[in-house]
Amino acid sequence: MKLFINKVKILKIPNISQHLFDHNNQFRVYRKVNFPVWLIILFLILHLPVLCEAQVTEKTGQNSQKEALKVFADGGIDRDYMKREIRFVNYVRDPRMADVYLLITDQSTGSGGREYTINYQGQNIYAGINDTLKFIRNSTDTYEIYRRGMIEVIKQGLMRYVVTTPIINDISISYEPTVKKTVPKEDKWKKWVFSIGSGIELDGEKYEKDWNSDISLSAGKITEKWKFTSHSSYDYSQNEYEHDERIIKDIRRELDASSRLAKKMGEHWAIGVNGNIDSDVRQNNKLSVEFTPQIEYNLFPYSEYSRKQFPIQIGLSLNHHDYYEETIYDKTSEIVSNINMSAVSVITEKWGSVINVLEGSFYLHDLDKNNFEWVNILNFRLFKGFSINTLLVVNLIHNQLYLEKGDLTVEEVLLHRKQFETRYNYHISFGFSYSFG
């Protein structure tokens, strides 16, 4: 009992008023220091539903983009621009991975513009769902007008596929009727298209001066049945070289004018006539005039010309040649005739494209005087993002009637003013490209 009393005596009884006073001070300090924190907490509580909804929306958008349509675009289109303007699809680097394979081809129009054919080929779950749209680029359209119009047409064709994907919920459709401009019924040019161009180029240094000028003219008219094209150019070049106090001057004048008139006789046949006038000092050609009637058969219909073509041509040419110098055959001028044949194969598919050109000709007065040329251009998509391209040109030459008699001077050899006798020439190039990311 005594022990208990002693313990009670040492207990310290707190002052209640002092405790309340200290507590109020602490509360005032606490309120003063943490007031901004309370505002932040209150703001978060009020906006918590909105933040959660935004987070859910962002995740939903990411999921929708993952399930977006996979597209591979091939052909004449600015792919970087397409990726910026069409963001509701995913772009793949391998056409085999695509849900939709876009193949864009083009050909010239009668008005001097280009007609683009956009072929949509469905793959995977869209196999068999194909479509084809066209876009016309006028000859006066700028590049920006062209690519904007092309993108709009591409979008229209993609909608039938995009509508089956979750991302369709993020796409809105608007309608803005276009006020059509009044177009005169009569074409004062009657579908003729003309163009003219010219240029001047100057280069110089202490021991060398170059001058070059050119002018070109072209005209054309294309209708459903007829096609006429004509192009002419004249080049003048003057080069001066100073060496050991000597000035070597080289002046060249080159003229080239060609015209072609053809009539389509159906989906596979066409007949036509070609005319050509040219002059070239390197080939000892003072003036050459050529007239060639031709007939053409295309293995594929002309309606598929933008994607695949295989025209075979045969013609009989009548040529008149005037030479600068007497030839090795003792001729200063002559009239000869020759048969020329050509076959061109152009294939554009998912794996790439291949172009083969085979041409041959021989003179009727001497069948041993002939020439054969083979050109092969290959662009092959080997695997995802990796493509190879090759160029092969082979010429077998046995028809150099124009070769100048006598030996060539050093200047003529160095300046390539004259052509050597040869039996062949070739050119081979190979390259590859790989894209990733």
Image (cartoon, rainbow, N blue to C red):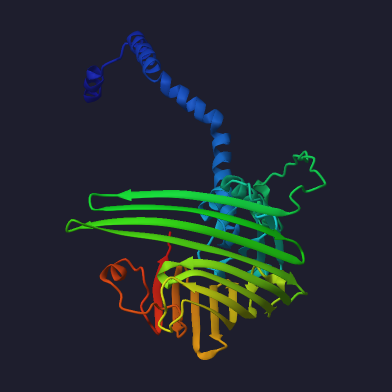
Residue 192 x/y as whole percent: 71, 54
Say whether residue 286 is left or right of residue 413.
right
Along the line of sight, which residue is nearer the eye, 127 or 141? 141
Q: Is residue 382 above or below residue 57?
A: below
Along the line of sight, which residue is nearer the eye, 195 or 175? 195
Q: Residue at x 39, y 77 (%)?
A: 404
Q: Is residue 338 above or below residue 410?
A: below
Q: Residue at x 39, y 20 (%)?
A: 34
Along the line of sight, which residue is nearer the eye, 180 or 25? 180
Residue 252 x/y as whole percent: 40, 61
* Quadrant of the drawing holding the C terminus: bottom left
Q: Residue at x 76, y 47 (%)?
A: 188
Residue farthest left in this picture: 244
Q: Is residue 266 above or below residue 363?
A: above
The image quadrant of residue 70 is: bottom right
Residue 306 x/y as whole percent: 65, 67
Residue 147 x/y as whole percent: 59, 50
Along the line of sight, which residue is nearer the eye, 180 or 288? 288
* Quadrant of the drawing holding the N terminus: top left
